Amino acid sequence: MSDYEVGYKKPPKHARWKKGQSGHPEGRPKGAVNFWTLVAKTHNMPVLVKFGGVQKKVSTIEAILLRQSESALKANLKAIKQATDLAQKYSRVLTEKEDQQLLDVDMSKFTDEELEILERAGRILDGGNKPTGSKGGGGGVDR
């Protein structure tokens, strides 16, 4: 007989896996991905979006968020609710430096159409009408 003892965690030599042999040969095919991988891949896929009259390549999820914000700025109540819910869920407290950077926005980079949308959004979120400017389209934004 052989000096190899067969027992617990000691299978017979002929029944052991051969080197390079899989324990599940018909298993998941190479290249197959799960649902969450597909979701991540789809959300990161680049798409072209027209923003401020210029086409820009952004991720799909960023394009969705831009459209959501755009819809909210056009007084779509459902979009406003969803946008504020997202903001509350994912917001964090800004440092003083980050807060100041947000306030130091160069308004000259916005188109007239974008400024008008921002002005309307300000009136909607403030709940009232702001005094109208010289253009008659609503005030509140200095250029």
Image: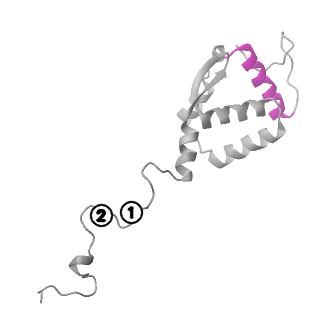
From this view, report whether residue 70 is shown above or below residue 38: above
Q: What stretch is highlighted in magenta?
A: 110-127
Look at mark 1 in the image and give the residue it sits on. 25
In depth, the one of 38 and 44 nearer the eye is 38
For the C terminus, the image quarter is top right
Q: How far apart are marks 1 and 2 (CA)?
A: 8 Å
In depth, the one of 101 and 1 nearer the eye is 1
Colouring:
one colour
**Would residue 95 be visible to someone looking at this image?**
no
Relative side of 112 to 45, left or right: right
Look at mark 2 in the image and give the residue it sits on. 21
Q: Residue furthest bottom?
A: 1
Q: Residues within 10 Å of mark 2 (few under 14, many from 20)?
A: few
Residue at 24% x, 64% y: name it: 19
Check residue 52 for magenta coloring. no
What secondary structure is marked by label 2?
Answer: loop
Amino acid type at mark 2: Gln
From this view, report whether residue 2 is shown above or below residue 123: below
Instruction: State the image quarter where residue 49 is shown.
Output: top right
Q: Where is residue 137 in the image (x, y as percent from the top left)?
A: 84, 16
What secondary structure is marked by label 1?
Answer: loop
Instruction: State the image quarter where residue 66 is shown.
Output: top right
Question: Answer yes or no: do the residues labelled 1 and 2 have beta carbons within 8 Å?
Answer: yes
**Would residue 29 be visible to someone looking at this image?**
yes
Q: Where is residue 107 in the image (x, y as percent from the top left)?
A: 66, 17
Check residue 116 for magenta coloring. yes
Residue at 38% x, 63% y: name it: 25
Q: Where is residue 76 in the image (x, y as percent from the top left)?
A: 82, 35
From this view, report whether residue 24 is shown above or below residue 53: below
Amino acid type at mark 1: Pro
